Image (cartoon, helix red, strand yellow):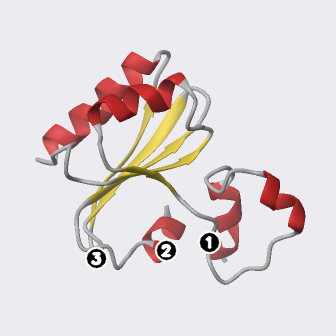
Amino acid sequence: MEGIHLEYRNMATTTLFVNVREKSFELMASNGKQLLIYNIFQYDTPEDFIYYLLFAAEQLHLNPELNPLMLSGNIQKDSPLFNMIYQYFRQVSFTDRPDGYEYHYGFEKLPSQMYFSGYNLALCE
């Protein structure tokens, strides 16, 4: 999550960041300068996933139609999970690989949001 803070610290609006794993996801909300929430949720179905995501947005008084949602990790644009997210959130986008690094050409074949946590391990020094 440190990588997200560094990459997106200049965003002007409160943004939700979700790092998707196989049966869990990390949720972070930030208004650019301040961390508002960080939590890990376990889920079994896309319905579980969207429940936790919408509940967190409600508790933070965020509007899913207006506040951006940035996705990273194990999620694709053509997945059922993404389709469910897009039913509720209008400003959905994927994170990019962190700036300031050179990547092997083989990484061009991978979606930019995949392995976001791995790319940011260098920040943990």
Which marked residue is nearer to the observer: mark 3 or mark 1? 1
Position of 43 relative to 112 (above/below)? above
**Around disc 2, counting alpha carbons within 10 Å, would you say few (fewer than 14), some (14 to 19), or many (20 or more)?**
some
Q: Quadrant of residue 5?
A: bottom left
State left or right for residue 103 relative to residue 32: right
Residue at 49% of width from left, 27% of height from top?
Answer: 81
Total numbered circles: 3
Q: Specify the amino acid type for callout 1.
A: Pro
Q: Marks 2/3: CA distance?
A: 12 Å
Which sits earlier in the primary sequence, circle 3 or circle 1? Answer: 3
**The furthest residue to the bottom:** 100
Residue at 49% of width from left, 74% of height from top?
Answer: 7
Indicate which disc residue 42 carries.
none
60 or 91, which is in the foreground? Answer: 91
Q: Specify the amino acid type for callout 2.
A: Glu
Residue annotated with mark 3: 33
11 or 32, which is in the foreground? Answer: 11
| SS category of the residue bearing label 1 | loop
**Picture coordinates of residue 29 (x, y %)?**
31, 56
**Picture coordinates of residue 77 (x, y %)?**
55, 37
**Picture coordinates of residue 74 (x, y %)?**
62, 39
Position of 90 relative to 31 (above/below)? above
**The furthest residue to the left:** 61
Residue annotated with mark 2: 7
Q: Specify the amino acid type for callout 3.
A: Lys
The reply to whether the C-beta atoms of the residues labelled 1 and 2 are less than 8 Å apart is: yes
